[in-house]
Amino acid sequence: MPAESQRDFFEEHGYLIIDDLLSSDELDMCRSEIERLHVLAADLEATGKPEARQFQREPHAEATHQDDGLPLLRKVENTGQFSEPFRTLSTHDRLIPVIQQLIGPDLLLYRSTLMLKPAHHGSAHALHQDSAYWPMEPPTLVTVSIALNEATAENGCIQVIPGSHKWGLQEWGLITRTDDAITSRDDIDVSKRIDVPLRAGSAVCFHSLMVHGSGANQSPHPRNTALYAYFSPVVRYAPKEGQPTQRSFPVIAGLDGQAEFTLTAS
């Protein structure tokens, strides 16, 4: 799809698929790195280091460990802090031009996360908008979810409601659920949601106001994704009461090659 058509599709529907972003070698590297991060999570937890808080266990599984004895994880936050391969992936040379086409040449990284849905255990995520939980205004960030395994309806692929990024910012409540409820709200037409299955190595980009969620992983296969959220420096940092008034973000592209850019709440 030509770049202009990609932008038009994204602006109309709120999401965009990038097929075959990663090579098989890059996928193998990512999968090996996920195994290493599980070992690191166990070590940090055993030694009581504060970094262990960045590794969140799967909250609703009966099991606490995988078959290999490593912790059953739901996600890893701030992956760039712990993994050079995942830090580098945030600057992928096939991904960044697409994001620049959507929101401009200067890009900052808001979030770098691994979302993990272990086989038979990965919990469902209720419908929500990312910007409902992020202190950034205006809510015009772009989230990219890169499938590191094949993502299917059976293992909990992302679901979106096309066009819902035009609804405006709303309240959603808790995202991770103990049941299969799609949402606790009764004013959402859930029949309009669609699955977004992806081949391993492909990615979906979506607007931070896009209403999205995912089902539980009831398959024997994991569904792991590398998730990054990007924004333009025209977006303001708007912290809630009690949060720091300044926050620094990695520069991914532009801004004269700076490494970081600091935003101060007005």
Image (spheres, rainbow, N blue to C red):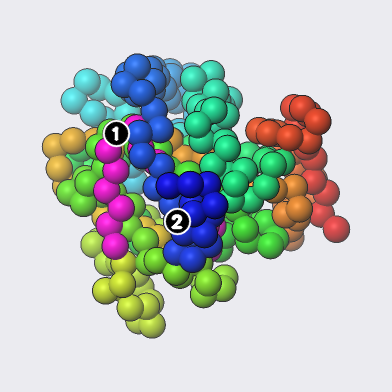
Picture quarter containing residue 29?
top left
Q: Which residue is mark 1?
A: 200
Above or below, comparing residue 242 to residue 31 in the picture: below
Distance from the alpha carbon under mark 1 to that under mark 2 = 18 Å
Q: Amino acid at mark 2?
A: Tyr
Would you place residue 89 above or below residue 263 in this image?
A: above
> Which of the 4 image quadrants contains residue 163?
bottom left
* Amino acid, disc 1: Ala
Q: Earlier in the sequence, mark 1 or mark 2?
A: 2
**Residue 59 seen:** yes
Q: Residue at x 43, y 52 (%)?
A: 16
Q: Which part of the image, by quadrant, shows the C terminus? A: bottom right
Q: Which residues are magenta?
A: 194-210
Residue 246 is one of the magenta-drawn residues: no
Spot the residue most to the bottom. Answer: 187
User: Which residue is denoted by mark 2 in the rendering?
Assistant: 15
Which residue sits furthest left? Answer: 220
